[in-house]
Amino acid sequence: MLRDVAEFYEGHLDVRLTQLTTWIEPVLLLVMGVLVGTVVVIMYLPVFHMAGNIQ
């Protein structure tokens, strides 16, 4: 009987973990994209500022 209960909860846990990873993957991808975009903007902003001062 305990084995049946353990299998039931293990299946329930597997479903929940699958749902959780389904939600976490896009969120992490979005966060990483924002971080990379921020770094790119921070790196290129001084270059654009200097180019604007030359003209």
Image: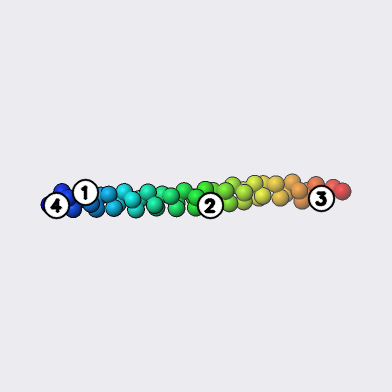
Answer with left or right where residue 3 lies relative to residue 43: left
Q: Amino acid at mark 1?
A: Glu
Q: Are marks 2 and 4 in contact (CB under 8 Å)?
A: no
Kindly identify the residue that appears in the image at 39 percent across and 52 percent down: 19
Kindly identify the residue that appears in the image at 64 percent across and 46 percent down: 40
Q: Amino acid at mark 3?
A: Gly
Answer with left or right where residue 20 lies relative to residue 1: right
Give the x, y percent position of residue 5: 18, 53
Q: How is the image coloured?
A: rainbow
Q: CA distance from mark 4 to mark 1?
A: 9 Å
Q: Please state which of the two labelled residues, at mark 2 or mark 4, is closer to the viewer.
A: 4
Q: Please state which of the two labelled residues, at mark 3 or mark 2, is closer to the viewer.
A: 2
Kindly identify the residue that appears in the image at 62 percent across and 51 percent down: 38
Q: Amino acid at mark 2?
A: Val
Can you identify the residue that label 2 sits on?
Answer: 31
User: Are there few (<14), some (14-19), or many (20+) residues within 10 Å of tag 3?
Assistant: few
Kindly identify the residue that appears in the image at 67 percent across and 49 percent down: 41
**Mark 1: which secondary structure?**
helix
Q: Amino acid at mark 4?
A: Leu
**Mark 4: which secondary structure?**
helix
Can you identify the residue that label 1 sits on?
Answer: 7
Can you identify the residue that label 4 sits on?
Answer: 2
Answer with left or right where residue 10 lies relative to residue 23: left
For residue 52, the mark is 3
The single residue placed furthest to the left in the displayed view is 1
Q: Please state which of the two labelled residues, at mark 3 or mark 1, is closer to the viewer.
A: 1
Earlier in the chain: of badge 3 and badge 4, it is 4
Earlier in the chain: of badge 2 and badge 4, it is 4
